Amino acid sequence: MDFDHFHTGIEIQWWLKKWAHDHPDLVDLYVVGESFSGQPIYQLTITNKSTGADTDKPAAFFEGNRHSGETSSAESALWLAHHLITQAGKDEKVDELLAEKAFYIRPVNNPDGHDLYLYTAQTNRSSVRPQDNDGDGKLDEDSGDDLNKDGYLSQMRQHVGAGKGTHVIDERDPAKNVMRSVGAGNGDYLMFSEGVDNDGDGDFNEDGIGGLDLHRNYPYNWHVMPENDATGRNLTQGGAGAYPLSEPETRHVYTWLMSHTNIGVVNSMDTRVPMHLRGPSTCDPKECMYTSDRKLYEHFDKAGAGFTGYRYTGSVYIDYATRNGGDPQPLFGHGPDFGYFQYGSIWYGDELWNGGDFKDYDGDDRFSDWERSRWCAENGRTDCFLPWTTVQHPKLGTVEVGGINPKFWSQNPSADLIGEWAANQARFNLYLSESLPQVRLSQVKVKTLRGGQSDGATHEIAATVTNTGRIPTALEQAKEIKIVAPDTVEVDGARVVGEAPEFYLDGGKAQKVTLRVAKGDVDTVKVTAVSVRGGLSSSTVPLS
């Protein structure tokens, strides 16, 4: 397997099936549901089956390619799966992870959009479900047109003469690839998106394929789309869908998570800020998060940037919304908010790739196409921008089509760079996985009680339960919403007298417990520390 090209849907399915076939001791492959168009959505469970069931272990869930064109995230999910599978038996750290933890990896959550992006010139925001984006009562009737047949929908320019246009060729760009807006009546060119006015309404490509956003379709703080707000004056959310979890791709994530609450960390990856991005999406973290939870997230923000070098980290509401200036802005129905406020987990929605923003030549802390083009020219790259080619437009006459590569420079890295970006993101995901809570039972001691105890107890069992992970067995938010039952200690082979102990363990903390038991018909019992998100840890002891 290589990571110097973007894997097609057929390739990905081939690799998933091969891994499951070749490594039945580590890998299970299954279909979690179907996409909007009826394609199977595949997922892997990766764990050492000989050390226990995946549901008895702390688990991580990693998802790629929710948004159609954000294919870099699928590559990072594949890189992580490939690393775990191929390094098993070779890397002690990987062996330890697979022995103690489970990985649920869904490389392509949106196979319809993934295929659309890689197999055609088209792209869209997220789901291919037809949508009336321009409000004319028709669905998907004016998508872009690949006029020069180069496999991309890019920019289109028409030379109209000095003082008659809105744009000029940007003099700051040595490669002369980039156009600069100078206002009506000041330019030589008019600019359009590549295509024709298919519906004859005077606009180009305003109603392309689909338009809903699978990352605005989660149930927490979901808001209706603008066209569905009967008041016409409330806060709405574009792309939200007809109702929470209306889209099968989002619903299949939700149902898996809710039936596998051993999952303590999630990363549902996108492109292309770049950013370690997480909730809250509608409020200031200092006001609406528990302090200990927020500080843990801040630790992961910093750690993530150490692995990836991403320019931005932090919350959607504050850090993401204001990265280019302005005030905080909410996103509704957002995955990271569901992940924290309703699922009580560490949930990131990381954004891979930097859009070609490698050097800020004018020092204004912003990046423009001319800077991207200049960097490419200075580094001998010829694939960042598509050459301007002349075509005959049915309405405009002679035009040129070209500009920044919309798929494999603007939205995703070029193929020769994807391996590095996928790997760095996957290494952060490994760090999240290593940080999962993990209960350890130790110092198990048995004391025989004198006969005639009023409660019928015959023995007292003392033990220590330690959380060796960085993450608590339940975040404070998880406790509030009661998504995670308390940790406890169980005894198999004897009857526990009285109430079993209940507690939660912060990262690195220990709890001493004492149980009174009544001996049954066996002389040896199994004592087990039980944690929903911290897994199981057992010890066998004799009752004399």
Image (tube, grey):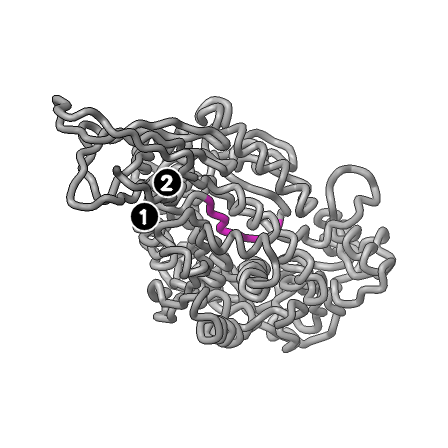
Image location of residue 13, percent across then percent down:
47, 73
* Residue 366 position in % (x across, y down): 73, 41
Answer left or right for 452 relative to 527: left
Q: Is residue 148 magenta?
A: no
Viewer-proximal residue among 404 and 310: 310
Q: Which residue is drawn at 64% across and 60% down?
A: 192
**Residue 70 in sight from this viewpoint:** no
- Tell me where residue 410 appears, x and y as whole percent: 66, 57
Spatial CA distance of label 1 from label 2 is 8 Å
Which quadrant of the view contains residue 134? bottom left
The residue segment tinted magenta is 265-272
Of marks 1 and 2, which one's residue comes earlier in the chain?
1
Q: Residue at image x 70%, y 45%?
A: 309
The amino acid pointed to by label 1 is Met
From this view, report whether residue 453 is shown above or below residue 537: above
Verify CB contact (< 8 Å) between mark 1 and mark 2: yes
